[in-house]
Image (cartoon, grey):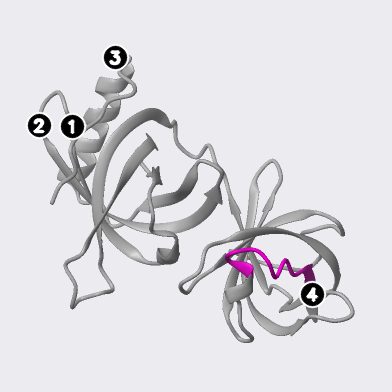
Amino acid sequence: MKPQQGPCFQVEEEVYVEPTAGSPGFHTHVVGFKISHCLILEHPFTDSGAHQVRVNDPLWIRCFRKTVLRFRVRVLRILREPIPLLLLEYPKTVEEINLRESDRKKVFLRGSFLDLRDKKSDRSWEGYILNISDSGCLMWGDFVHLVDRDVLLSFRVPWTGEKIQAKARVVRCEVTDKGIRSGLKFIDVDPDTQARLNGLLKSLEEQGRTNIVAEPEA
């Protein structure tokens, strides 16, 4: 994160809004802003995620440039008339995310994870890993409400049967016409797990393996 001194967005620019509690994200546009005071977005009330947003809800906003700009703000006010608008805090800090931080390998690995914040539940969420690197992965599955949550990801390497289990944080979610995609960033990876991940990536590189399906770990 770095302090935000000037505007990091433009009027009419498309942004992606990611609620942090219980609702899917949605696309909208910047209507205006006043530096150090507020950011104003169009409010698409009919969107499945937008209509659930409430005053004081924390939101992640993403601007897509050569790098992704990401910042967290709270909802100040919601207007329906004369124009539907979302009035948000002006961001104090902005995070730059390099989408090519690590070399991503395309795969189709079936996996599962547990929500580490929910200590009373052993419910396992299942999905498919669409790409993976030594720093994270992209998954498809119905877990959009887990943005900013820590999870325990489990899957097996299909040609060896080796189990890989890694702690990760859900850093972004997006509802697309092909389903919900979630970006996971590996955190607190121990040396043994890192070695397994590196071994998987090396094998994918050497053998050119893609579109591989592995059964989920219960």
Q: Which residue is mark 2?
A: 161
Q: Which residue is mark 1?
A: 157
Q: Is there CB contact under 8 Å for labels 1 and 2? A: yes
Instruction: Pick whichever, 96 or 151, lies toward us.
Output: 151
Few, some or many C-alpha atoms within 10 Å of disc 3 (few <14, some 14-19, many ≥20)? few
Horizontal side of residue 196 vs 181, given as left or right: left
Nearer to us of marks 4 and 1 is 4
Predominant SS along the magenta part: loop
Q: Is there CB contact under 8 Å for labels 3 and 2? A: no
Residue 170 place in picture, x, y as percent: 41, 58
- Looking at the rendering, the stretch of residues picked out in magenta corresponds to 40-50
Nearer to us of marks 2 and 4 is 4
Q: Earlier in the sequence, mark 3 or mark 1?
A: 1
Question: Any magenta on residue 42?
Answer: yes
Q: Earlier in the sequence, mark 2 or mark 4?
A: 4
Q: At 25% from the left edge and 74% from the top edge, which residue is drawn?
A: 118
